Amino acid sequence: MQIRRQAPDERLLQSTPPDWYAFSPSPVSPDLATKLKANEKYYVDSVTLIAEENGQAVVSASAIPMRQNVRGHVVPLAGLSGVASMPQVRRRGLVRQVLTELLGQVRDSGFVVSAQYPFRPSFYDRFGYVGVPKARTARFNPADLTYLQRADLPGEVTWGPIAEGYDDYRALALEILPQRHGFSVLPDSRDVYARDKNEKWLAAARVDGNVVGAVAYTITGHAETLQADDLLATTPLGRALLLQFFARHADQVGEVSVRIAPDEHPELWATDLAVRVETDVTYPTGAAPMARVLSVAGLHGMPVGSGHVSVEIVDDPYIAGKYVLDGTSGALDVTTGGDPAVTLNAAGFAGLVYGVLDPSDVDLRGFGHVPTDSAAELASLFPRRVPYFFARY
Ligand SMILES: CC(C)(COP(=O)(O)OP(=O)(O)OC[C@H]1O[C@@H](n2cnc3c(N)ncnc32)[C@H](O)[C@@H]1OP(=O)(O)O)[C@@H](O)C(=O)NCCC(=O)NCCS
């Protein structure tokens, strides 16, 4: 078996790439094959590794070069995608070898963190990933917001096909990136898929010509649902303008369904707003995302609390070692060495960095050992935060 990097146009020469077999209806019809081949241009920046047997690709795994805000520090993020093996070679450890190699290559080329939407988290536990919150969905009747219909808000909403408003939408996401913990963006080459596909409307809230909010959506039918992607807003006014836009669909649709950050509270948006907030975690599709750290040194300078602690990261090919983590300046200072009492595996470390685990969870979840007297230092260094993973792919 040989593992190697696949050239971007090479996939077009394969009859059935493993990820097509795994994720598409098959046998792949000529129409679908044409569509899949046309989509290849959106993956030109991805790093794809394949394992071959008898000249045939039997395993593939890709990393999409993204960017993510981790506690205010924007770092290169490797978004895993297309992890698949052909059924005849499954459970032989080939995916483990390919993924281990892929993560090593992207770490060596400067990626600091990695994230993905797992088909089953227990599979990715072994690769050092920890679960992070899934975005919520808020559902409400826009008639509950009718008071907003005539409200005189100092701004406007522009509307049109997403292809027309795409540049503003992208610019808004890039503006939010440095502001919001967990927020991540795709590379330009992949992000323009939504523009080119042009299957959604885009409503953009503007104040003095500046975009302060945007939401992409579809309408399923009369008296049915306005189905919206993430409600993005940089100010409360931006959000109010978008809610006013939703309110103007009262009597046209019975429900607005909109994706929101996991720490958003729509029950506070308006008086008398009856709203259902939910998340549904299912496998193999519909999982919450998972993330891991690929380089501890790459976190140097990240805004943190004032703790000071030595940790040993164990059982990991990329970040195992002893580190002194110091936050007394307000920015993380990382040096190697020290005499750590804290032991963490990569998932435990990621849980603390992303702010999704309390130090006392580490022992409970089997992610390492945190002595009681180190727990307070760790909690002060890495206060709990709720990451909002925006980019889906
Ligand atoms: C999921 C999939 C990639 C696993 O491939 P594989 O060739 O069986 O993987 P490996 O043999 O390299 O197994 C790697 C490890 O994962 C474990 N594993 C495999 N399938 C698993 C599952 N369904 N749940 C939990 N762990 C699993 C293996 O036991 C092995 O653990 P070990 O290294 O500790 O022994 C393959 O079944 C597949 O292509 N499925 C369809 C597509 C898919 O779901 N891809 C994942 C998208 S996120």
Image (cartoon, rainbow, N blue to C red):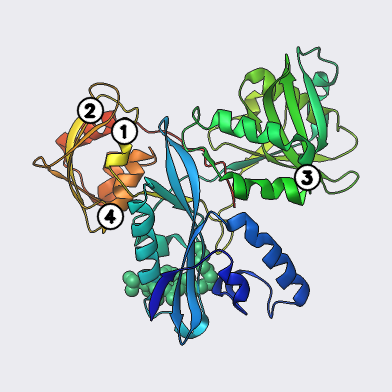
Q: Which mark is residue 307?
A: 2
Residue at 23% x, 59% y is 315
Tell me whether circle 2 and circle 4 mark residues in contact (CB < 8 Å). Answer: no
Along the line of sight, which residue is nearer the eye, 372 or 70? 70
Place of residue 14 in the rendered image (x, y in percent of width and height, measured from the top left) = 59, 77
User: Under tag 2, what secondary structure?
Assistant: loop
Residue position for label 1: 382
Q: What's the amino acid at mark 3?
A: Lys
Crowding at label 2, few (<14), some or many (≥20) Cα neighbours within 10 Å? many
Residue at 72% x, 37% y is 166
User: Is residue 270 at least partly visible in the picture?
Assistant: no
The disc, 2 or 4, on the residue closer to the chain's N-terminal end is 2
Label 3 vs label 2: CA separation? Answer: 46 Å
Tell me whether circle 1 and circle 2 mark residues in contact (CB < 8 Å). Answer: yes
Along the line of sight, which residue is nearer the eye, 388 or 98? 98
Residue position for label 3: 200
The disc, 3 or 1, on the residue closer to the chain's N-terminal end is 3
User: Under tag 3, what secondary structure?
Assistant: loop
Residue position for label 4: 318
The disc, 4 or 3, on the residue closer to the chain's N-terminal end is 3
Q: Quadrant of residue 33?
A: bottom right
Q: What's the amino acid at mark 2?
A: Gly
Crowding at label 3, few (<14), some or many (≥20) Cα neighbours within 10 Å? many
Residue at 42% x, 50% y is 114
The disc, 3 or 2, on the residue closer to the chain's N-terminal end is 3
